[in-house]
Image (cartoon, rainbow, N blue to C red):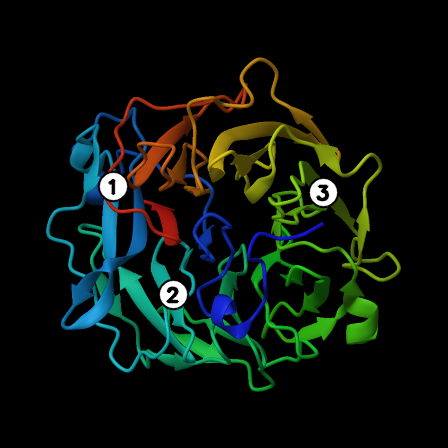
Amino acid sequence: MTMKVRVLSAALVLAGTMWMSACDHYVCSTTFGASTCGSNGGGLSQGGNGNSQTALIYFMNNAATNNGQQGALALEGVNVASSGTFAPVAGFLSPTFTGATGEGSGLVIVDKKYLYLPFTGGELFGYSIDASSGALTPLANTPYTVSGGTSIVADPKGRFVFVGGSSGISTFIVNADGSLGANAQSPFSTGGVTPVTMTTDGLGRFLYVADGADVIAYSYDQTAATLTPVGGSLASATFGFPMMQVVGESTGNYLVGITGLTGATDNQVHVFSIAQPGSANAGALAEVANSPFLTSYPPVFVVTSPSGNFVYTFNETQSQTGTVIAPMEGFTLSNGVLTELPTVSPFPALLGLEGAFDQSGTYLFMIGQEPNTTVTGTIPLTLDSTSGNLGTTLPYAGAPSFIIGVTDEP
């Protein structure tokens, strides 16, 4: 099988965190923190109707300039001040990334309070999120030094931040004020592998690195996030699954992965079981029975719902004119088995390149930009928590981006 321009050269890795074949980009879209958030609890939604969740999406707008610097963060919100709309947040100003080199390569939000953004030149910027405006204020000692900064992920309990680069993985403790303390032993070796995407298990015990050829598994301790290769060595921790992206789910029992291959129409999603603590080789991966599971279209990005019940793929396919966006697909995930949602999936009207959930699981923010669609930015899709169906009554807003972070109101 062949990849469409899927060469893991330094130039492409520097583009970001997860490769999207139509755009020659990588993307990172991650949310962390508490799983629920009331919509009438003050802050951005103060005076609300109590019936609609307020959620925010921060994204890098590479077409914008920021004090002469190319690229600026932008902010959109659903139901801000009980508006019932989805629109840019009034008055938001991007911070200035003083000293940044290279390109922005991902974004994570921790505990709805803190935002972290790495640059490929080795800088990691951190900000606190203002609950009343969404404004960003630099954290103490930002920017932090990292090893490369090509990918980023946070511990699901909000305790640690992991940043991947060509020289290994830098790990940080999230302090009470959101500032970061570096693990004295980092960066931790990846054996020369540059992490393209990273994920944790859903319970915050293991870190997984994917580069399109293998998946490397680490356990991490619960106080300083010191990384230890599963099985005691990088050789034993390297699993020959050619995944370009792997994602965890809430039970901590499984990973879901895709190869991201479109040129060979790889219509499959893989599910891996995680060896649990107390078992031999805890953290090790094994493909579950009947995996991989067939899809209608080749997946290029995959997300799991915060509940862990649903999996959604963003897809591309080949046409006479080249690669085009294909409809999204949805699946239930139960005991490691993927089953396509009956009657509704594939979703013929949902054409996107990537997406991210808010912590409550109310919205899946879909992003896309393709010649075969009218998508010009982001749209919040509402999730039916019983059926898994996705829908929306809200229009697209903003510019498309491949560096995004979603959060419920702080």
Q: Do the residues labelled 2 and 1 touch (CB within 8 Å)?
A: no
Disc 3 is placed on an element classified as: strand
* Residue identified by numbered label 1: 77
**Which residue in the rendered view is the most extreme toward the left?**
91
Left or right placement of residue 361 versus residue 332 in this view: left
The three-letter amino acid code for the residue at tag 3 is: His
Compute the Cα span from label 1 to label 3. 33 Å
Q: Residue furthest top?
A: 343
- Residue 298 to residue 209: above or below: above
Q: Which secondary structure, mark 2?
A: strand
> What element does badge 1 sit on?
strand
Residue at horizontal 41 percent and vertical 79 percent from the top: 121
Give the Cα separation between the discs numbered 3 and 2.
29 Å
Instruction: Report the front residue among 101 and 274.
Output: 101
**First-in-chain label (2 vs 1):** 1
**Rendering coords of residue 229 (x, y %):** 74, 72
Q: Residue at 49%, 59% (x, y): give it.
A: 158
* Quarter assignment of residue 225: bottom right
Per the image, the residue denoted by label 2 is: 116
Give the class, few, some or many, for how many residues have Cα within 10 Å of label 1's Cα (few <14, many ≥20): many
- Front label number (1 vs 3): 3
Identify the image quadrant of residue 241. bottom right
Q: Is residue 150 visible?
A: no
**Circle 2: residue type:** Tyr
